[in-house]
Amino acid sequence: MTALPVISTPSSSPILLRETVDGGVAVLTLNRPGARNSLSLELIDELHDALKLIAHDDGVRVVVIAANGPAFCAGHDLKEMTAHRNDADRGRANFARIMTSCSAMMQAIVNLPKPVIAAVQGIATAAGCQLVASCDLAVASDQASFATPGVDIGLFCSTPMVALSRNVARKHAMHMLLTGEPVPAAEARAIGLINRVVPHGTERAAAIALAESIAGKSAHTVKIGKEAFYRQAELGLADAYNYASQVMTENMMARDAEEGIGAFLEKRKPEWKDC
């Protein structure tokens, strides 16, 4: 794999980089280091478009979202958001467009039939924290921190709240949302916002290694499991069990389940067909 730069790049550089690592891991890198990788509308759209392409790319089995520069993502681009304050509607249409586009992109991560792992090297605030929470897994540097500080500037982090409150317990989420205080990586792991904390500078490699381990599983099985995980989480207990029982029944009919169980019983390595 060719190493990705982690320093500031010229403004003419692409704002989103993509590479594919051997084994079917796609790495999407936010590349606005001079703007702390804030989510401009253009970056939101490019990330969303990349996810749409990956959804139909059989060569990609797992996605890693990383970032160049010292910050992972500082949230929305506030200069861009306020650029239409002098419009007749005081910017309402612009605000709605940005929020709608960002919400659709975050949902695309959850709905992607492939796991998505965040590799966080620095701060992830507001919509940046939302981006981490929207990913299925997250690996962070021991120097990373997470916050939803919108309350400090009179703009409550309501859309980040959706993803955050689906990752951590309510009181932890409310503390972050009401205080805006940064949460260090170790605490973020303790409350369930991220999965692993690794030495600074190794987070990307660690996320890719985790992705490669998942890429070795049946893509068909992983797709079934990811979709079922998020769907059952929104159901009541009885409905969740009923739904999950149906999913497992259908999963048992898959060729890869037959092969995997057979390989386990025969003490050999399975040969996945992803079907």
Image (cartoon, helix red, strand yellow):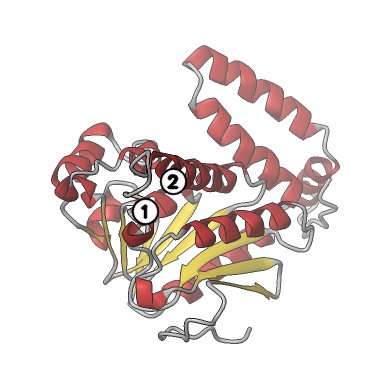
* Relative depth, front residue between 44 and 1: 44
Q: Is residue 272 left or right of residue 125?
A: right
- Residue at the image position 20 percent from the left and 34 percent from the top: 171
Is residue 230 depicted above or below 272 in this figure?
above
For marks 1 and 2, give the CA distance. 7 Å
Q: Position of residue 21 (x, y in %)?
A: 66, 75
In the rendered image, which quarter contains the N terminus? bottom right
- Residue at the image position 36 percent from the left and 72 percent from the top: 35
- Number of numbered discs: 2
- Dot 1 falls on a residue whose secondary structure is helix
Q: Is residue 242 left or right of residue 219?
A: left
Crowd around label 1: few <14 · some 14–19 · many ≥20 (10 Å): some
Q: Which residue is mark 1?
A: 81
Q: Position of residue 269 (x, y in %)?
A: 77, 60
Q: Which residue is mark 2?
A: 94
- Residue at the image position 50 percent from the left and 76 percent from the top: 205
- Dot 2 falls on a residue whose secondary structure is helix
* Residue 142 seen in this snapshot: yes
* Residue at the extreme front of the image, as rendered: 88
Is residue 274 depicted above or below 43 in this figure?
above
* Relative depth, front residue between 240 and 96: 96
Q: Specify the amino acid type for callout 2.
A: Asn
Q: Specify the amino acid type for callout 1.
A: Met
Classify residue 72 by image quadrant.
bottom left
